[in-house]
Image (cartoon, helix red, strand yellow):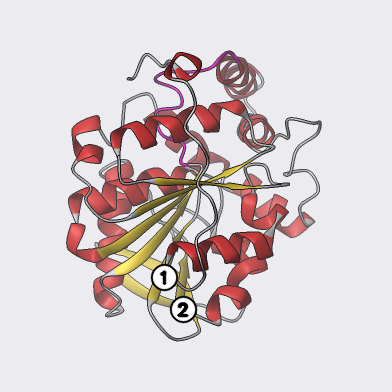
Amino acid sequence: MTPMASETVNGAVLHYEERGSGPPLLLVHGTGSYAGIWSPVLDGLARSYRVIAYDRRGFARSAGAPHGGRAQHARDAAALLDALGASPATVVGWSGGGVIALDLAATFPDRVAALILAEPALHLTTHPTPGTIVMSVRSAFQRYVRRDPAAAALAMYRWADSYKTDGNAFDPLPEAWREQMLAHAPATLREMDQMIRPYPNRAAIHSIACPVTVIEGDLSNPAFARADRFVMRLLPQARLVSLPGAAHMLHIDQPQGWVDIINQATGQMPLPPAVPSQNPQQTSDPRS
């Protein structure tokens, strides 16, 4: 990545990189991640957009723990868009960043022209799958018994980035990326703790009126497909698009496919066929 600039918003210094020109596109990274993880798709996106990728408060170069929980991240994103004169923007939120993007659109609708949600980690621990429970137990063992926060965060990363086929997308990442994400362990665990409470709530999500696209990898952990369907039920205007050959790190597994979907969602390219809705009995969920 090129050298990052910074803006002070809400008492925190947020570091960001800006590339390209055109309609503003804000990239909100997931739990434990940081702006550098977007590097496989930045050049492709910068051909069509003014791309803004930033380190959320408490991650990588942006120091400081959020004082208002995850809602502080939504306030930071709104303030950063204001500081950069980039509102309204198309907001791309991945994983935990997708949850923050939803709150941003619900709380600051004038800042968001459209939402693109890449497997948002919505209410994963409040209505867990069996795999989510197993991961939580393994992470808690490393955190509280072995007193190893990095190993606790690693348990989550490997679970979230697992393939249906075998293995995970975290272990093959460049060493510097893995080290940076493991260095985020305290912030990652803090954010995992905050997932115990539903955020944003259903009413807030249901209030979102802007266009919404949900991207789903066909090799992803089933917990994310479940969360995607929950979003689709709350937002009838949302469109679900599948990215073949990708798991949860969609933009790393299939960077060109990712860029194409962003272009399709914003009208730069023709839309692909939508993913058919499944039988409601097949997607029953206590949150519905």
Q: Tell me the residue at 50%/44% (across/down).
A: 95
**Residue 52, quarter of the rendered image:** bottom left
The answer to whether residue 124 is magenta is yes
Numbered circles on residues, count: 2
Q: Amino acid at mark 2?
A: Tyr
Q: Are marks 2 and 1 in contact (CB under 8 Å)?
A: yes
Mark 1 sits on what residue? 25
Q: Tell me the residue at 43%/15% (across/down).
A: 284
Q: Amino acid at mark 1?
A: Leu
Q: CA distance from mark 2 to mark 1?
A: 6 Å
The answer to whether residue 277 is magenta is no
**Left or right of residue 57, residue 40 in this image:** right
**Left or right of residue 149, residue 169 in this image:** right
Q: Check the image and name the residue furthest to the bottom.
A: 21
Secondary-structure class at tag 2: loop
232 and 270: which is toward the camera: 270
Residue bounds of the magenta highlight: 120-130
Q: Position of residue 225 (x, y in %)?
A: 53, 32
Q: Position of residue 27 (x, y in %)?
A: 46, 63
Q: Earlier in the sequence, mark 2 or mark 1?
A: 1
**Left or right of residue 118, residue 75 in this image:** left
Mark 2 sits on what residue? 49
Q: Position of residue 177 (x, y in %)?
A: 69, 56
Instruction: Give the class, few, some or many, for how many residues have Cα within 10 Å of label 2's Cα (few <14, many ≥20).
Output: many
Secondary-structure class at tag 1: strand
